[in-house]
Image: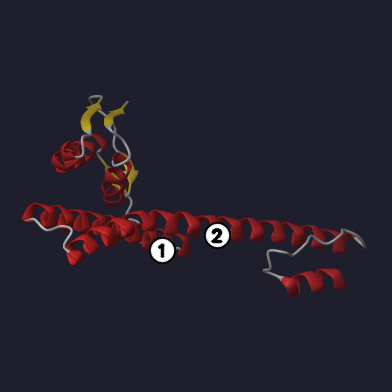
Amino acid sequence: MQKVVAAARAMPSAEAKPVDVQGPQEVQELTRAFNSMIARTQASQKSQREFVANVSHELKTPLTSVQGFAQAILDGTADSGDARQKAAQVIYDESGRMHRMVLDLLDLARLDAGTADITMAPVNLSGLLNAVAEKFTPQLQRAGVNIKVDVVENLQTITADGDRLRRYLPTWWRTRSSLLLAVV
């Protein structure tokens, strides 16, 4: 029991080691449960570290663009009206991208904490996909993404959070050069 107590005091250290299972049956069961808790805690910590590293990397890319184009405006490298317009557009687009990432992170934190407002309701997938495609077609075409929505007739509704679906579908599209949405 003293080994379990000592290991518990060392938690949530990444270096915490499992305790040897020994002693009466009840102590062995407690030790196994404790060792399982150590493994889950360490896996969670590793996952969080990887997540933070990924988020940092994802935010670094648009931030580098924003800084570079802002510097071009400040030092006069973007000296023509067209160059300044292009720089301003990149800054605007990349800051919007960072804003969406931050909103996604806040949403993830709320989901993790169990405080997210999820509104489940019947969603007509055909209508949702067509509405999202229509809304983003000009933006997608400028980015060189072709979109076609192909949905079978009489598609049943699903129960989901339609607002979240509308929000995350365009995020997924940004990673593709051609897209066919087919729901059967």
Q: Residue furthest right?
A: 23
Element at label 1 = helix
Amino acid, disc 1: Arg
Q: How many marks?
A: 2
Is 156 rendered above or below residue 41? above
Q: Residue at x 65, y 61 (%)?
A: 41
Q: Nearer the viewer, residue 182 or 10?
A: 10
Which part of the image, by quadrant, shows the C terminus? top left
Q: Which of pointers 1 and 2 lies earlier in the amino acid sequence? A: 2
Is 78 rendered above or below residue 142? below
Question: Does residue 161 show up?
Answer: yes
Callouts 1 and 2 close, C-beta under 8 Å? no
Q: How is the image coloured?
A: secondary structure
The location of residue 84, given as percent across then percent down, is 12, 57
Is 122 rendered above or below residue 94? above
Q: Nearer the viewer, residue 122 or 172?
A: 172
Q: Nearer the viewer, residue 160 or 163?
A: 163
Q: Is residue 27 left or right of residue 52?
A: right
Report which residue position mark 1 lands on. Answer: 110
Q: Is residue 81 left or right of residue 2?
A: left
Q: Nearer the viewer, residue 15 or 3?
A: 15
Question: Does residue 1 show up?
Answer: no
Q: 10 Å neighbourhood of mark 1: few (<14), some, or many (≥20)?
A: few
Q: Residue at x 32, y 60 (%)?
A: 103
Residue 49 is tagged as 2
Q: Hey, which quadrant is residue 24 in on the image? A: bottom right
Q: 10 Å neighbourhood of mark 2: few (<14), some, or many (≥20)?
A: few
The location of residue 157, given as percent across then percent down, is 29, 37
The location of residue 9, given as percent across then percent down, is 74, 75
